[in-house]
Amino acid sequence: MATFYSTFGGQLSQAELDFVDVDTAFDNPLYLDPYAIQIRNDEWSATCGDHIRSFFAEVLEALRDDNPARAGHLLGNLHEPNETCFGQSVGEPAGRGVGHGKALDLVEALRHSRAFGTGVLADISEAELFIRGVGPDTISDLTTNILRGLLADYTKDQCDLLGIPTRTLPLDPCWSAERQDWVSRFYELPISNGKPILLVPKFSVRRTLSLNSQEFWNHYMIEFLRQEYLDARSSLVRTFRDGVRYVTKKSVKERHPLIKDDLATFVQRHPEVLEEYKRIKGAQGPLDNDDLDANFDETVFARVLIDRLAGIATGNNTASEYHRVAMGITTFLFFPSLIKPIKEQEIHEGRKRMDIKFTNAAQIGFFFRMLQAPQTRSISVPVECKNYSNDVENPELDQLTGRFGLQRGFFGMMLCRRLDERPRVVAACRDAAGDGRGYMLVLEDADLVQMLEMVERHRRPDIDTFLQRRFDEITH
């Protein structure tokens, strides 16, 4: 399979990339999931969530105001996207979203749905549960259209990071949460297979939508009703020979077939069941690398990265190669806690220096503690890569602390090849922390190798302990 990144000569694997590295010649069986986006707390997802909620609030308001023209205008701009190459089509990506005719059908389906009439429908991610004719493709494509501008900006950032060329192109309108309407603009996007491509962060996609009507009906509504019929000693109750009473799932399904309006009525009466379903689905987290590549084995890949790192010489001539490999290792080790890498600077005083800023999206573990701790407040994590043959000195450390601030936080990492005087560097980092200049972890190749070996030995959770131990060195 020729993936998007490989067509540009890229040498990083899916596990080292923040985005889904799609095969641009075919639809990839993935969905951009609005619920998966809206439950996240990182800055990019929060902005996306604001756009999604803003759009759907406008649609619902137009319907409540009995303004089908406004609703039709909003939904009429949701053309069928194929820039992400997502979906279930066979052959070349064709797009399936909401064209003009389907937009009118969707307006009518929303207007006449029980979910809208009762006020149960509050979010676009719930539309697949309650609205007739709305499936996962429609939800994913709706979300893609709404977020087109944000995805285009994300794509440009990733292309800048990886050195992928882009072209300035006009595309379909994108949603403006400020104007509460569609706006046209030009985008800088890569071209692959003769068409523009939108890259999608892998933490925002799912194999199936988080909220699925079939799953909710089968595993939540039917199970709830089965217990309700049992408690009420209804006519559906049967008795085993030993006197134990039971209700078959089949009998409940026969009485309550999957009808989306009935799902809305059930949720109106029992909103706690939907809340529990959403809580459980939200706890499942993003896809793993082996979800995106069935042949991927992270224990084997960890050794590949160890060998790749060892094969890079120090010095300015190989700095770009080291930067690329170090960035890939950082993503592999710390995703999904660290996401959305952005390149900020490349040259400093004649020496190549790759400065990368990751968004801290951690919900547990070391990076979550860095996010929550008042002294670090690590909203983002700057990472500097030094391919020097000698130790890092105070000026390099000062460069990193200079990137800290109230809008970013006060924690960062420096990756270097080797520390001959590690105690001196640790002491300098301790002094910086004590002076209130921020907190820095300086990690050499040996540290990266140690963490990769933890993955190789099926001990990935030990990485958290390792990082905390390194942090304690500069704070105690």
Image (cartoon, rainbow, N blue to C red):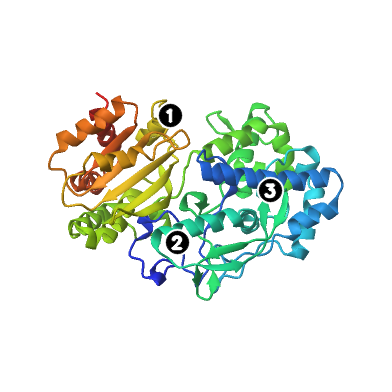
Residue that badge 3 annotates? 127
Task: For marks 1 and 3, give the one nearer the viewer.
Answer: 1
Would residue 465 appear left or right of 10 to someone viewing this image? left
Question: Could you tell me if residue 236 is visible in this image?
Answer: yes
> Which residue is nearer to you in this view: 86 or 344?
344
Q: Which residue is tagged 1?
A: 372
Q: Using a 10 Å C-alpha cutoff, classify the residue at mark 2 as few (fewer than 14 neighbours), some (14 to 19) or many (20 or more).
A: many
> x, y percentage for residue 373?
40, 27
Which residue corresponds to mark 2?
Answer: 159
* Cα separation between marks 1 and 3: 34 Å
Question: Which circle marks residue 238 in the picture?
Answer: none
Q: Residue at x 68, y 27 (%)?
A: 232
Judged from this view, the residue extending furthest toward the bottom is: 194
Horizontal side of 460 relative to 246 (left or right) equals left
Q: In this rendering, which labeled residue sits more in front, label 1 or label 2?
A: 2
Q: Using the numbered discs, state the Cα–Cα distance from disc 1 to disc 2 in whole angstroms.
A: 31 Å
The residue tagged with tag 2: helix, strand or loop?
A: helix
SS class, disc 3:
helix
Is tag 1's residue or tag 3's residue first in the polypeptide sequence?
3
Between the residue at mark 3 and the residue at mark 2, the CA separation in whole angstroms equals 33 Å
Return the x and y of residue 178 as percentages of the image width and height.
Answer: 69, 46
For residue 103, what is the image quadrant?
bottom right
Q: 10 Å neighbourhood of mark 3: few (<14), some, or many (≥20)?
A: many
SS under mark 1: helix
Is 344 left or right of 387, judged from the image as shown? right
